[in-house]
Amino acid sequence: MQLYNKHSAEERARIIDENSQERITLSFYKYFKLGNPNLFRDHLFIVWSKLDVLGRIYVAKEGINAQLSVPKENYNKFKESLKSLTPLNEIRLNVAIEQYSKSFLKLTIKVREKIVADENNKFEKEIQKITDEEIKKIYEKEFQKEKEIMTV
């Protein structure tokens, strides 16, 4: 079984147009321990390729993060494919409010270190830079604002 896309993005766009294919765009993520992300990635690619799933999916030892579209006629089969995987069997799917059939033009499933890019833990580094004294000043400033509002 091939584990790559057969069609270019341009070919896929043409196929979607020719078939007037209605697609459901959705996203989901879940943190769970994954022993072999590469094997999990290959399994998802094989199963979801058969369902004509298109999108960007990141898999890591910590879980999965997916933004994808699936043909409307395969939506229930896609949900069944999730239910067959223990960590994903009760996952919440976030269906897009507006649907666009060409939101994704190929299936890309990448194994990453983390499922969410965090700019090299920039947020954690920023938090560590705030001292207790700075936090105290922030609270005092907010408390003073609230006090002024209450006295008006």
Image (spheres, rainbow, N blue to C red):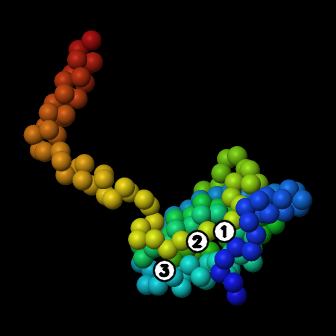
Q: In 3D space, how far apart are the residues under numbered discs 1 and 3 (Cα atoms)?
A: 17 Å
83 lies above or below 127: below
Tag 1 near tag 2, CB within 8 Å:
yes
Residue 35 x/y as whole percent = 43, 84
Badge 1 marks a residue whose secondary structure is: strand
Q: Nearer the viewer, residue 84 or 104?
A: 104
Q: Earlier in the sequence, mark 1 or mark 3?
A: 3
Which residue type carries mark 2?
Ile
Q: Position of residue 8 (x, y in %)?
A: 74, 66
Find residue 56 and report its image quarter.
bottom right
Residue 143 at x, y = what percent?
A: 20, 28
Asked whether disc 2 touches disc 3, contact meaning CB atoms under 8 Å apart, the reply is no
Mark 1 surroundings within 10 Å by alpha-carbon count, few (fewer than 14), some (14 through 19), many (20 or more): many
Three-letter code for the amino acid on which mark 1 is drawn: Leu
Q: Is residue 33 visible?
A: yes
Q: Secondary structure at mark 3?
A: helix
User: Residue 107 — which label?
Assistant: 1
Residue found 68% across the figure and 58% down from its top: 104
Q: Residues within 10 Å of mark 2 (few under 14, many from 20)?
A: many
The residue carrying mark 3 is 37
Query: What's the amino acid at mark 3?
Result: Pro
Quadrant of the rendered structure where residue 7 is?
Answer: bottom right
Circle on res. 109: 2
The quadrant holding residue 18 is: bottom right
Residue 84 visible in the displayed image: no
